[in-house]
């Protein structure tokens, strides 16, 4: 990890090796949904400033974010279908112990089997083996992924195991009924919005007056969920679950640090990928959009 200092600020430098790899994964992601074709979004207006922990936000978007999503495609693509079946397996309040049924364990395994068949995860496995961060055997790799993402751990001390990496990143959790944790996944966002659980409040601009584009596949959003407001949530839009799994797993395995931030360029997006470690497991992971050369930023 390289740092450069400017005027007292520490800036991350672009990680060229990961940028090259992540672009290969992007190109290999045949299951990705195409904006304007497989889904359409309606960004509406810019969200206002909200303090973390607040339950109130000005609604700058009277309509939902997602206008249309090709649900047939969600159901017919193996990885998406297996992913959706996992979303309702979790008790979203931290401090409430999770119970994993044999059926849920089977669903976790079915999801991992599905993503391991994809080119995205094959390239990821090859890279990790080259780095000696994963073993060559597919079974070993699958067990490693299961542990990192699905092993339950305790977020609130003194309580039973109440969380896992998958739940936090992809499903979302609430803490003390005051704060939204995680929920960085567009499919979960869409499904929760469809069931009137999420209310989209508007987009977060990246620079002064810079408006994102409806075709952008990384966005920063503000929304409320279960009566709580998430002031800023960054998320990939349209990408497959295997693509996100790949990025976060690679960054998690390359470092033992509590927090790892890598600056990468994927397509026209300059991103920081942030991964928090919870011991041997993923605590949280998300993208932060730094810029997109889709527009005049200044």
Image (cartoon, rainbow, N blue to C red):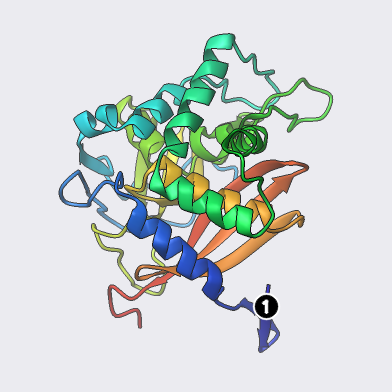
Front position in the image: 36 or 47:
36
Extreme residue toward the front, this view:
137
Q: Position of residue 291 (x, y in %)?
A: 41, 72
Left or right: where does residue 149 sit relative to residue 107?
right
Note whether 292 is above or below 111 in the view shown: below
Q: Position of residue 57 (x, y in %)?
A: 44, 45
Total numbered labels placed on residues in the image: 1
Residue at horizontal 40 percent and vertical 62 percent from the top: 24
Residue at horizontal 24 percent and vertical 58 percent from the top: 215
In terms of image quadrants, where is residue 149?
A: top right
* Callout 1: SS: loop
Extreme residue toward the right, this view:
158
Front position in the image: 231 or 98:
98
Crowd rating for badge 1 (residues with CA inside 10 Å; few <14, some 14–19, many 20+): few
Residue wearing tag 1: 2
Left or right: where does residue 170 sit relative to residue 32?
right
In terms of image quadrants, where is residue 187?
A: top left
Q: Which quarter of the image is occupied by the N terminus?
A: bottom right
Residue at horizontal 50 percent and vertical 61 percent from the top: 288
Left or right: where does residue 269 sit relative to residue 94?
left
């Amino acid at each position: 990890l390289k740092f450069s200092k400017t005027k007292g600020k520490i800036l991350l430098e672009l990680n060229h090796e990961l940028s090259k790899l992540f672009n290969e994964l992007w190109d290999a992601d045949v299951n990705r949904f195409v904006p304007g074709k497989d889904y359409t979004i309606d960004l509406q207006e810019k969200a206002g400033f909200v303090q973390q922990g607040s339950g109130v936000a000005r609604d700058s978007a009277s309509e939902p974010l997602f206008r249309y999503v090709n649900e047939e495609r969600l159901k017919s693509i193996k990885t998406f279908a297996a992913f959706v079946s996992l979303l309702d397996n979790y008790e979203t309040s931290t401090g409430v112990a999770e119970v994993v049924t044999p059926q849920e364990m089977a669903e976790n395994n079915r999801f991992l089997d599905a993503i391991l068949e994809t080119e995205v995860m094959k390239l990821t496995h090859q890279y990790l083996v080259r780095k000696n961060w994963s073993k060559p055997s597919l079974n070993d790799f699958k067990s490693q992924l299961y542990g990192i993402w699905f092993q339950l751990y305790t977020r609130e001390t003194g309580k039973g195991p109440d969380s896992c990496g998958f739940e936090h990143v992809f499903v979302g959790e609430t803490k003390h009924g005051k704060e939204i944790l995680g929920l960085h996944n567009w499919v979960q966002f869409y499904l929760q919005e469809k069931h009137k659980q999420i209310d989209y409040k508007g987009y977060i601009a990246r620079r002064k007056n810079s408006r994102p584009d409806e075709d952008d596949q990384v966005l920063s959003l503000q929304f409320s969920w279960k009566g709580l407001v998430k002031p800023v949530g960054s998320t990939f839009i349209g990408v497959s679950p295997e693509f996100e799994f790949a990025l976060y797993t690679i960054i998690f395995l390359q470092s033992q640090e509590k927090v790892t931030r890598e600056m990468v360029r994927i397509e026209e997006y300059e991103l920081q990928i942030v991964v928090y470690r919870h011991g041997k497991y993923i605590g949280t992971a998300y993208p932060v959009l730094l810029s997109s050369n889709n527009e005049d930023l200044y």
